Image (tube, grey):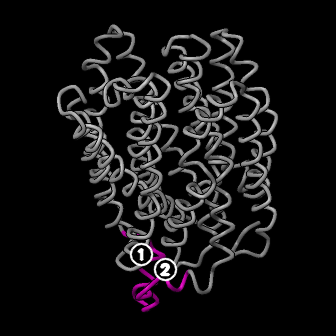
Amino acid sequence: MTHVALASMVGTALEWYDFMIYNTMSALVFGPLFFPTSSPMVGTLMAFSTYAVGYISRPLGGMIFGQMGDRIGRRAVLTITLLLMGICTGLIALLPSYRTAGLAAPAILVLLRFLQGIALGGEWAGAVLLGVEHGSADRRGLNASWAQMGPGAGTLASSAVIASIAALTSGTQFIAWGWRIPFALSGVLAVIGLWLRSGVPETRTFETMRQSGQTLRSPIRHLLRRHGRSLVIAALSRIGPDVLYALLVVFSLTYVTQIVGQSRVVVLTALLVGSAFSLPATIGFALLADWVGVRAVYLGGLLAAVPFACLFFPVVRTGQEAAIIATIAAGLVIHASMYAVQGAFITACFPAEIRYSGSSISYTFGSLAGGGAFAPLIMAALYRSTGSAVALSFYVVVATVITALGLLSARGVAKQE
């Protein structure tokens, strides 16, 4: 299980390292590099729209790779998604700017972002299923959490890399060439991930299902016909955590640097500290879920997110570095309480023969339908139109309440507790 845990974690770590690098650069440099004819705020909005493209393509990846994962196996699909993500991120490091290539530069950027989203749409469910289907049923929370530690590890790695480069380069150097280095380093993580996964066999659950002839020709059709309620409930579980995460790791970069007037190093340090705390917190909450139940831990995290959303902007607006770092770090720990058990909750909503498809589709469509795909764009637009952060806090609270209602209605769905 140690090898399985590492193989499960490394894929999502790479995916989120890549996504965090992209998200950070969207807030810091992509506006002037790829949308230079716009005002700073409009350029940021356009950069965040490319962030949304990656979310829009996730459901397509969920359907394509989910179907493949239920028909040919979890392991083969995970190799494909890891390669696709690594290649796309490496190519972004070589991308010319608008000044050099004109409109071709943002067009290629959007295309690579689209392919990144497809890869991530198929990666997550398979990574969770590696742990769940290789492990014992009484450790479902812990086994599912290994993949959930990937985002924390990826965020930690990306924050450390970006903070180091930002500290070692001037603002001009960072915009000129420094931003490319984190994207290029993604190739190293991809090689490590492929090496780890090459030694992991197919899950016992899928092998048993394949040998007994239980695999379906069209898992998605079966899913839509017979498991619609499970699909909706699993999708609702994504909304609140996604919007909170977008606030913490994407919009906060713009808010703290452009509105509060602090340096980008402060926010990057906050993300680094928060990610460092979220890793052990993820394991702790997963172990707690195996003791008191998955839904109980999930609902506790949602409850904590409501007052946090109301206090976030007043605290950050003080401009105090320590307060900003502590607040963002605390938010990432709250997010970890929900994300730690999200994999266990979603995969338990579906039987084995449609588990990859159901988990992938609900995971990706839930984020898209709930606004996670457009959350940074919505937040930037709300603030631009109102000039107040109250509407942004309300947006996070509403998303959290919707997810709580979904969890409360999950009794009787698969193996939910």
What span is in magenta?
A: 202-223
Residue 250 part of the magenta segment:
no
Left or right relative to 286: residue 367: left
- What residue is rendered at 65% in x and 29% in y? 383
Give the percent coordinates (x, y) of residue 339: 62, 48
Does 22 sit left or right of 80 as displayed?
right
Pick the residue in front: 5 or 301: 301
User: Is 284 left, or right, of 406 in this rendering?
Assistant: left
* Residue farthest toward the bottom in the current orientation of the protein: 213
Q: Mark 2 or mark 1, which has the lower sequence index?
A: 1
Residue 272 rendering spot, x and y as whole percentages: 52, 24
Q: Is residue 202 above or below residue 398?
A: below
Q: x and y percent of residue 244 in the render? A: 65, 40
User: Badge 2: how crowded within 10 Å, few (<14), some, or many (20+)?
Assistant: many
Q: Which mark is residue 67?
A: 1
Q: Is residue 295 above or below residue 204?
A: above
Q: Which residue is mark 2?
A: 220
